[in-house]
Amino acid sequence: MIKDQLIYGKSFCAVEHSYTNEGKEVYYCLQLKKQKKELQVASSDQFDDFEALTAHLKSIGQQHVVLIVNNNQVLSKEVTGVNDNLNAFQNAFPTLSATNFYSHTHSTSEKLFIAIVRKEIIDNLVNTYAKASIAVVDFSLGNLALGTLSEMLDDTEIYTSNALVVITNQQLTSIKSKQFQLEEYTINGIGISSNYILQLGAIVAFYLQKNVHHDSENLEEFKQKRIFNLGYKVALVIIFFGLLVNFMVFNSYYGKVNSLNQELSIHRDAKNRLKALSVTVQKKKKLLSELENSSAFSVAKYIDQILTDIPKTIVLKEAAYQPVIGNLKKGKEARFSNHQIVVKGVLNNNIDFSNWIDEIERKDWVQKVSELSIAKDRRKTKSNFHIVITIK
């Protein structure tokens, strides 16, 4: 049941090629749809040309039909006393060759009904439908499709599109062609017009009872195409789903990788900053160590000796040990003049100043004394001096 639904879907359709009481060709199309396990009439339409019919079939999404050929190209007869189709054909049409015709029979307890049509007519119709992308999965001839419904009917007379069919004891007893009368019937809960009753019988016979009246080649070809199309679509869905899952997984991992890369970048930056800070700290530690290693007592002793030997003609303004080089700036590392004492002051006597410098240079802890500047002030009675003492 599920397989049938995959192949045929939920819509079933039959088209009858018939004729009116004026002899004009007409097409009757019936579509049934399965809803809640019941068949309901979806559409029943009449067309005067084939192009309008195929356009309608496409508009309702119908890709497969059961064809009923019930026009003037079909020959129908009743035969008694035979049980097989070949003898029925020979008895009914002794001058015709069975190899050139398609036949459809319906047998009862008393007689056998047979309808025939030339093979090229059916083959051309099947090809014409195929060019319109509509598959003919089976076909029925004449009014014999009504035989499928006979078991659902009591003794009655049923009009089709162009005949009157008599049913007795739920069996066909006679078919009178060229009888035109429009009637409404209710069969197994389905309301149906006489112009569409053969289509109902063909739908029940083929789609529900699985009766195939003729060569199943067209049916098998349709099934193969349908299975291929379904398989192709399923394969595409599976591939798409696989790609979607792969994309989602990749996107998830890609997000995690990005997150880890960001964390790694943050850690790397923090490590670099920590490394730079460590270098700065090490420099400061080294400087502090150097400052600490320099004996505060020795420095004080050196400055004390400078002050003790200073002449009265010299006045000191500043004495600094390891002074800062340049100006201090925010965010810039401070640099110091290592192992140096800077002395600034005022002198009144150049000779005393020179003797004092000589006295300093003779100290065993002094490497050299540099006179950076000696400048007279505005009154020219005193001179400002700036010397640097380098410690061994």
Image (cartoon, rainbow, N blue to C red):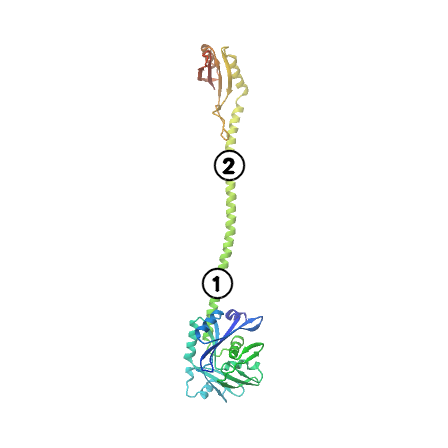
Position of residue 146 measured from the top left corner of the image (x, y, whole percent) = 52, 81
In the displayed structure, 389 sits above or below 68; it is above
- Image quarter where the N terminus lies is bottom right
In the displayed structure, 93 sits above or below 188; it is below
Badge 2 or badge 1: first in the primary sequence: 1
Count of number-bearing discs: 2
Q: Residues within 10 Å of mark 1 (few under 14, many from 20)?
A: few
Quarter residue 129 falls in: bottom left
Identify which residue is drawn at 56% across, 79% down: 185
Query: Which residue has dot 1 on it?
Result: 235
Name the amino acid type tagged 1. Ala
Query: Which residue has dot 2 on it?
Result: 273
Position of residue 190 measured from the top left corner of the image (x, y, whole percent) = 57, 76
Q: Secondary structure at mark 2?
A: helix
Residue furthest out toward the front: 22
Position of residue 125 measured from the top left corner of the image (x, y, whole percent) = 43, 76
Nearest to the observer: residue 390 or residue 11? 11
Q: Secondary structure at mark 1?
A: helix
Residue furthest out toward the bottom: 81
Q: Residues within 10 Å of mark 2 (few under 14, many from 20)?
A: few
In the displayed structure, 256 sits above or below 306; it is below
Identify which residue is drawn at 49% across, 57% down: 243
- Cβ–Cβ below 8 Å for labels 2 and 1? no
Name the amino acid type tagged 2. Arg
Q: CA distance from mark 2 to mark 1?
A: 55 Å
Q: Which mark is residue 377?
A: none
In the displayed structure, 355 sits above or below 215; it is above
Identify which residue is drawn at 54% across, 18% down: 300
Quarter residue 49 falls in: bottom left
Position of residue 166 measured from the top left corner of the image (x, y, whole percent) = 54, 85
